Amino acid sequence: MLSADEFDRRHIWRPYASMMTPPPLHRITDAQGVYLTRADGGRMIDAMSSWWCMAHGHRRPEIVAAMAAQLQRMPHVMFGGLTHDPATELAQRLVRLLPPGLDCIFYADSGSVAVEVALKMARQAQAARGHATRTMFASARGGYHGDTWKAMSLCDPETGMHGHFGGSLQPQFFVRRPPVAFGDAWIEDPALNGLQEVETLFAEQAGRIAGFIIEPVVQGAGGMRFYHPRYLAGLRRLCDAAGVLLIFDEVATGFGRTGRMFAMEHAGVWPDIICLGKALTGGHITFAATVASRAVAQAIAGGSPGLLMHGPTFMGNPLACAAACASLDLLQAGAWRDDVARIEAGLTIGLAPARDMPAVADVRVLGAIGVVEMRSPIDVDRAHARAVASGVYLRPFGRLLYTMPPFITSDRELEQIVTEMLNICMIESGDI
């Protein structure tokens, strides 16, 4: 008879993995705060916030209580023709958080679906405005927008994880990644700051482009790069001039991760459509939202068929809405601002020694995000196995070793994370 782990490896597909040669696994039996407890009784710090979503830590009492209370009343009801208080309350909170004008909210299942909805919104709005040829989209290289089909077409077509799908995906328009790094002096010359390429693209192809989608300030899974906020201001101006709708993908960066409630606040620039997810519920249950401007919603309503053609089964799920309301209450209390600033300082100081290691190409920190870019791909299985001995769970990808810890991570726990990241860097450098 197969053990639980053997059965798992034989029958359950892991993310980004082979079914025939499954990766090593840690069986988790409990999660609390920043810690994951393994079946063997050992504990590990979740330095990844369980893929960037567990902002307040695992089993946050306020969120758990809100979900438990909602579970006793109504875990789910369809959203077609019906509504409920958690959905209304969440919308009220989001409208208060977002800039004026971004107030038409569509609830979705996940961040990738939120992106799909945003693309549909842009396409329908453009068609309703009489631009039937605007069926395509533009983006910056180095980006990542999810694993669903249309979203994949807007991830970097060459260096991104979806490049091997090749001709199966509809070709889109791409400009080079924003070249000026966050924290560097802004370069006014459009030929050097990346905006001239956008302007040229729009001059040649705007009649075919419905929207331009980008992750503001932080390009996440496509390379963990931080770019200058002034790029977004120029992009906003160019989109307005060309009649292209601007879409911000804040699935990974929203709700405090970069030190601002939303990464777009670094630039003081607002999009026509924004995608939210991951930390929206504090990571306690999957949920997302696509929020459009009133102008976009009015355009869709004025076209044919006058309806936004999307409707997930679990749209507006009351259990998820209740979790999101509790998570936003925690964010609005404001303690996260000091925590993220403290984590940023700790990561900046703690990871500085990696800059002098021969295997390290770059070190960068923004908010509660710490990244060490190596010169060669990291041995992921070796790093994964170290979690047992080190008590820190990190999951590198490609040449990137990074952490996005929960905001409640203590200084001692942060030091433990940084120490393990430096140890991995030394191993990769051949120093251990």
Image (cartoon, grey):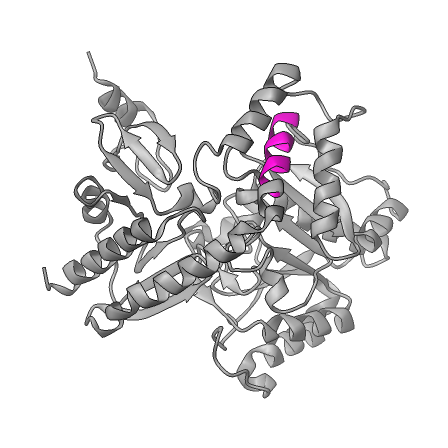
- In the rendered view, would you say 106 is above or below 238? above
Point 26% across, 59% down: residue? 377
Point 31% across, 42% down: residue? 45
Query: What secondary structure is the stretch in magenta mostly built from?
Result: helix
Q: Extreme top residue here?
A: 1
Point 34% across, 56% down: residue? 402
Percent position of residue 44, x then y: 27, 39
Q: Is residue 319 located in the magenta-colored stretch of the structure?
A: yes
Percent position of residue 188, x then y: 59, 87
Q: Image check: 393 left or right of 100?
A: left
Q: Image check: 162 left or right of 112?
A: left
Q: Is residue 237 located in the magenta-colored stretch of the structure?
A: no
Residue 303 can be seen in this image: yes
Q: Tell me the quarter of the picture where residue 317 sits.
A: top right
Q: Image check: 418 left or right of 426?
A: right
Point 57% across, 57% down: residue? 171
- In the rendered view, would you say 424 is above or below 197? above
In the rendered view of the protein, which quadrant contains the C terminus? bottom left
Provide the residue span drawn in magenta. 318-328
